[in-house]
Amino acid sequence: MNLIKQYLVQAIANAANSLRLSTQKIEVVGLLKEVISRSDDIENDIKKMKKITQFSTLAIRLNEIYNYLDQPQVEMGKLSDKFREHSQFLVKDLNNMLEIVNPLSFKEAVKNLHAEKNSAEEEIKVDLSKRSAEDISFENQDRESIKEKIIMDDDREDDQFFQNYESTILKPIKPLDAMLKTLADGQTDKEDLVSFADTLSHNAEVSSRAGFEIIANMHKIVARALRLINKNNLTADKETIESMRACLIVIVAVVRGKEVNITNYLNRAEEFGERIDNLTIKENTQK
């Protein structure tokens, strides 16, 4: 991924962290980041996005950021400040887009984004004049069957996925929270530490594959912390326990789409994540 696309993806992720997002909105953010990261011509794709209702306002902001990054000379010393500024600018426009789309409508909008290109490729590859009436009839029937499948099946599959996903993610949270309280009292069961760490690592992978990066990151932080505690490389003091619980609160709030402000919990969780990263690096260098 080139630097401009990476910058845009990270700015969107940073902006998303400032919002209270439901599971579906988190999926849309993941899909948006995927569209940008996989773009072969990000400048042109952003221009096309400006013409699509669902994307237009956000695309205008992305275009401004792109133009700044595409300058012959970018002041590297000010880049981190500009990144924070750009991320903050994106918050409102990203939130507005998330209010009018869901994962299915977002995917349909993406199809419109690439419709012109796909149409041109089809005209080159297919000689329409040689198709018989029977071929056309079959094609129409095929298109209708696809429409029927989209209408009848996709929503149910999505609903089933989210129900299973929510159940999988939330199931270990209460037992883990209870275990953290015993840790705070100095009661440590090493088998529980390893078991919960393995479960959270698995759920982090599930969340990451589904595009739920915030949830995945919270799982990774707690899993690594549990492993560090198990190896006596992290003290299970009050601050550590409360920071781990902050991660769990973010997970539950995001998965259940709770309309509450979790900014303080998210900030604490991310600060704790940085601490865990540093401890992990230190642990690896000592091996």
Image: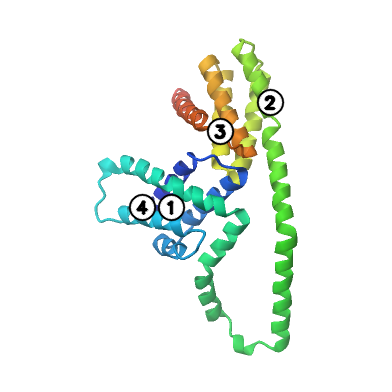
Viewer-proximal residue among 176 and 23: 23
Residue 263 visible, this angle:
yes
- Marks 3 and 4 sit apart, C-alpha to C-alpha, by 28 Å
Which residue was labeled with disc 1?
Answer: 1
Name the secondary structure under disc 3: helix
Number of marks: 4
Mark 2 highlights which residue? 174
**N-terminal of the two: label 2 or label 4?**
4
Q: Residue 65 carries which label?
A: 4
Q: What residue type is labelled 1?
A: Met
At label 4, the amino acid type is: Ile
Q: Where is residue 271 in the image (x, y as percent from the top left)?
A: 45, 28
The structure residue drawn at horizontal position 49% and vertical position 58%, both measured from the top left corner, is 55
Mark 1 and mark 4 lie on one chain; the one further toward the N terminus is 1
Mark 1, mark 4: which one is toward the viewer?
4
Amino acid at pointer 2: Lys
Q: Nearer the viewer, residue 242 or 52?
A: 52
Residue 235 in view (yes/no):
no
Q: Name the residue under label 3.
A: 218
> Do tag 1 and tag 2 residues touch (Cβ < 8 Å)?
no
* Image-quadrant location for residue 23: top right
Calculate the distance from the C-alpha at mark 1 to the C-alpha at mark 4. 17 Å
Residue 72, x across and y down, in percent: 25, 56
Foreground mark, 3 or 4? 4
N-terminal label among 3 and 1: 1
